[in-house]
Image (tube, rainbow, N blue to C red):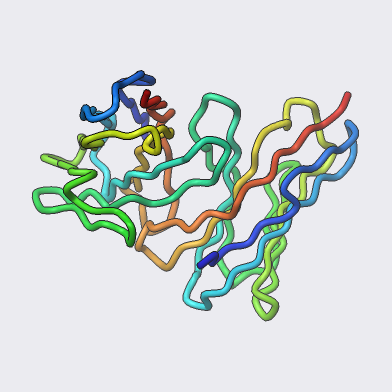
Amino acid sequence: QQQVKQSPQSLIVQKGGISIINCAYENTAFDYFPWYQQFPGKGPALLIAIRPDVSEKKEGRFTISFNKSAKQFSLHIMDSQPGDSATYFCAASKRNTGKLIFGQGTTLQVKP
Amino acid sequence: SAVISQKPSRDICQRGTSLTIQCQVDSQVTMMFWYRQQPGQSLTLIATANQGSEATYESGFVIDKFPISRPNLTFSTLTVSNMSPEDSSIYLCSVGTGVFRSGELFFGEGSRLTVL
């Protein structure tokens, strides 16, 4: 049972463009939605996270948009840079359980 | 965020053997978890490592195959028992820090295991 669905599987963006990755979840009990960035050979690094009481959260070039009624959330990377080339995972969990359910991942390539 | 060290970082093992992976954190943490990332795939939770008691396993994972210990608030081990090539994966330790109620979880660099 895939509780968190992520798309697209891969994404190619030109330098300076906007990268958009989407996720949808099924379980309405989820109340914490983080995004992780993973470079080859490294562990996932927490990028940004949101709770369902807000519709948007921005940290630098990274923004999460959250639509509770649609059970969807997305990551926007503004002014994408070649250094942003990595695999991005969305995830979801229930409050204070720490048990993350991950999406399938999106491989982002930013071309110079 | 906590500094998480995993050992070994990578290993090549023979079928039928067992390997123990260590996770050491530089500060006391509320929660510790073990995840598996199969080649080119996403992360799947194996179990919650409970301090001083038996780990809590997710569906599809059993203690006989993945015994876990957590003797204190900074250290845990995961053993992959009687390995087969299907166990070739990256095994990741994850921790929730002292301010865990924020929900933040951090990952180690992972232990890349290849079973021949």
Q: Residue at x 41, y 67 (%)?
A: A95
Q: Where's the N terminus of chain B, which quadrant?
A: top left
Work out whether residue B79 can be spotted. Answer: no
Using the rendered view, name the quadrant where residue A2 is placed. bottom right
Which x, y percent locates residue A48?
A: 60, 48
Q: Is residue B66 above or below residue B4?
A: below
For the residue pair B46 and A75, the one nearer the viewer reads as B46
Which x, y percent locates residue A59?
A: 68, 46
How many marks the image carries: the answer is 0
Q: Residue at x 72, y 46 (%)?
A: A62
Using the rendered view, name the quadrant where residue B67 is placed. top left
Which x, y percent locates residue A112?
A: 88, 24
Q: Residue at x 23, y 53 (%)?
A: B62
Q: Is residue B112 left or right of residue B47?
A: right
Which x, y percent locates residue B16?
A: 23, 30
Q: Is residue A97 above or below residue A45?
A: below
Q: Where's the C terminus of chain B, which quadrant?
A: top left
For the residue pair A100 and A64, the one nearer the viewer reads as A100
For the residue pair A60 and A72, the one nearer the viewer reads as A72
Using the rendered view, name the quadrant where residue A34 is placed. bottom right
Q: Is residue B20 left or right of residue A18?
A: left
Q: Residue at x 48, y 32 (%)?
A: A43
